[in-house]
Amino acid sequence: MPRATLTVNNITKAGIAVPTETNGDTVNGHSLPNDGAKTFLLARNSNGASTARTLTVRLQGSVDGQAITPKTYSIPAGQSRYIGPFDTSRYGSSVAVDVDNAELKITAFRLS
């Protein structure tokens, strides 16, 4: 199946209500429409014990025929991380995001 596209929530000067999180999809992954400068993720690890979870962002392209190593983020149990923005020359106009467990909850934002 194709990656699940994350809904991007536009943050304006008027503010926005807290959006609904997306459960991490460990099978298909996610994609994020990317403008290169104002788009970012909020990843929350809902694990209530002590298990860190990993979010992986795939970089596009290759160097000398070798895929570029993805960028990984370890998110401690019960904590959140803001991740981004994503330069389009490295991540593309659609960012590929993977999670190691459905306990990672993801929300995408764009500053308007």
Image: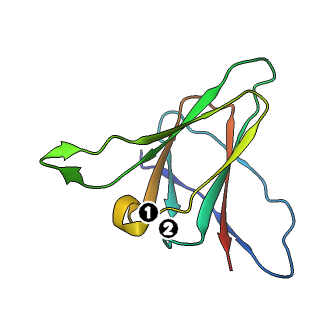
Could you tell me which secondary element the residue under label 2 belongs to?
loop
Locate residue 76: give its quadrant: top right
Q: Position of residue 56 (x, y in %)?
A: 49, 40
In depth, the one of 78 and 46 nearer the eye is 78
Quadrant of the frame with the C terminus: bottom right
Could you tell me which secondary element the residue under label 1 belongs to?
strand
Residue at figure coordinates x 36%, y 51% from the top left: 59
- In this picture, is 65 found above or below 102? below
In depth, the one of 66 and 21 nearer the eye is 66
The reply to whether the C-beta atoms of the residues labelled 2 and 1 are less than 8 Å apart is yes
User: Identity of the amino acid at label 1?
Assistant: Ser
Label 1: how many Cα within 10 Å (few below 14, some 14–19, many 20+): some
User: What number is the disc on residue 94?
Assistant: 1
Q: Position of residue 7 (x, y in %)?
A: 63, 62
Res 96 seen here? yes
Label 2: how many Cα within 10 Å (few below 14, some 14–19, many 20+): many
Residue at figure coordinates x 35%, y 67% from the top left: 89
Residue at figure coordinates x 12%, y 48% from the top left: 64
